[in-house]
Image (cartoon, grey):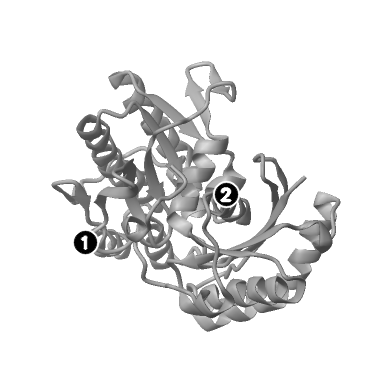
């Protein structure tokens, strides 16, 4: 059985995974950088990744029941991301590839979210989830820390049909959470408080064509928090507004492309309220909504390994000389040779 060892290190997560060439995830180990207050400082996150990466290699291989000699391919998150963080995964991947004479593939993190959704997405119905129906040609609503994009395959590339004009939706939630002194990551803590809120506060609704904007919302919410507005109602209102904005753009992309499948990806896609809104929109327009398990929504190395397998099987690989990190490469810069 041919296996790929994948590395993820674009931001706050360092992950290592073993995935077979037929799409079976044998292990998916990860360590998340967190704080009790404040946010993410790149050099501190890189130190965190350095201290965990090779322990994660050992635990991932052990959990998969294999050794490094059983590995046929190494893949790593090459783009986009925080330079300090990307370098840690890249150095680990290059070192093992050079030491063991293994082929190396660099993966675009955003595309990896879509590919793991195509592989492992479960169709949502009113009765729950079904893993019997596969997701083939979806629109991806990619909602993560630094990224908010609506993506679909067209003309040999993954095209961005809409995106944030300023900050990603996850960074918006983290910035808002910092104003409430909730620590990092803030999104899950905002979700908990939102469940206790009930009053919808009037906030800016910033959809501009096919794009969205969140920066003004952070300012408005911070001002309302200083004025003494209920934190629970602020969290409830923030979620309702920003999720409605990105669902609107996703629905427009479905209508524009004629596609009939939506898959959620990225850490914010773990949010149950966002999942509910996505399913309702799809149900109303006769489309299918697909969701992956949370461990594959958050940053993880299984999606890097699987996308690396797809690329390598289509003839893509990197020499060590050309395996530098590419922090600013966009989703639609990548030539998709495997579809």
In the image, 104 versus 41, the foreground residue is 104
Q: What residue is rendered at 61% in x and 54% in y?
A: 305
Secondary element under disc 1, as helix, strand or loop, is: helix
* Residue farthest along the front direction in this orientation: 315
Residue 219 location (% of width, % of height): 25, 65
Cα–Cα span, label 1 and label 2: 44 Å
Residue 323 location (% of width, % of height): 53, 74
Residue 331 position by quadrant: bottom left
- Mark 1 and mark 2 residues within 8 Å of each other at the beta carbon: no
Please identify the quadrant where the N terminus is shown. Answer: top right
Residue 74, compared with residue 52, is above or below; it is above
Task: Identify the mark nearer the N-term, 1 or 2.
Answer: 1
Local crowd at mark 1 within 10 Å, few (<14), some, or many (≥20)?
some
Residue 123, compared with residue 173, is above or below; it is above
Q: What residue is rendered at 48% in x and 37% in y?
A: 272
Side of 331 relative to 192 (left or right): left
Numbered badge on residue 255: none
Please identify the quadrant where the C terminus is shown. Answer: top left
Residue indicated by mark 2: 313
Local crowd at mark 2 within 10 Å, few (<14), some, or many (≥20)?
few
Residue 206, compared with residue 36, is above or below; it is above
Residue indicated by mark 1: 216
Residue 153 location (% of width, % of height): 34, 42
Residue 144 position by quadrant: bottom left
In the image, 82 versus 91, the foreground residue is 91
Q: What residue is rendered at 53% in x and 54% in y?
A: 315
In this view of the protein, can residue 28 be seen by the observer? no
Residue 214, compared with residue 42, is above or below; it is above
* Residue farthest along the left direction in this orientation: 209
Side of 84 relative to 150 (left or right): right
Residue 136 position by quadrant: top left
């Amino acid at each position: 059985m041919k296996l790929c060892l994948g590395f993820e290190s674009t931001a706050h997560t360092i992950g290592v995974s073993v995935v077979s060439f037929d799409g079976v995830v044998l292990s998916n180990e990860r360590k998340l950088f967190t704080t009790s207050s404040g946010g993410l400082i790149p050099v501190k996150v890189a130190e965190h990744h350095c201290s965990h990466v090779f322990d994660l290699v050992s635990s991932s291989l052990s959990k998969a029941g294999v050794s490094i000699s059983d590995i046929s391919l190494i893949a790593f998150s090459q783009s986009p991301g925080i330079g300090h963080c990307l370098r840690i995964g890249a150095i680990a991947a290059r070192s093992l590839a050079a030491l063991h004479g293994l082929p190396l593939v660099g993966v675009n993190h955003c595309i990896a979210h879509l590919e793991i959704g195509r592989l492992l997405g479960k169709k949502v119905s009113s009765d729950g989830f079904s893993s019997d129906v596969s997701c083939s040609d979806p629109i991806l609503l990619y909602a993560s820390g630094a990224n908010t994009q609506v993506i679909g395959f067209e003309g040999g590339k993954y095209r961005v049909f809409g995106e944030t004009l300023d900050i990603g939706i996850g960074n918006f939630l983290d910035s808002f959470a910092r104003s409430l002194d909730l620590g990092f990551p803030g999104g899950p803590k905002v979700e908990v408080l939102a469940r206790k809120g009930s009053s919808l506060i009037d906030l800016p609704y910033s959809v501009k064509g096919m794009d969205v904007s969140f920066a003004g919302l952070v300012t408005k919410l911070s001002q309302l928090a200083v004025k003494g507005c209920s934190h629970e109602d602020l969290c409830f209102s923030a979620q309702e507004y920003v999720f409605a904005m990105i669902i609107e753009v996703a629905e427009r992309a479905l209508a524009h492309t004629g596609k009939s499948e939506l898959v959620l990806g990225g850490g914010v896609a773990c949010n149950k309220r966002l999942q509910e809104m996505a399913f309702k929109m799809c149900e109303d327009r006769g489309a299918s909504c697909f969701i992956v398990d949370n461990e594959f929504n958050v940053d993880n190395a299984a999606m890097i390994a699987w996308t690396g397998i797809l690329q390598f099987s289509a003839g893509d690989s990197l020499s060590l000389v050309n395996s530098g990190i590419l922090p600013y490469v966009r989703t639609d810069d990548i030539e998709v040779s495997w579809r």
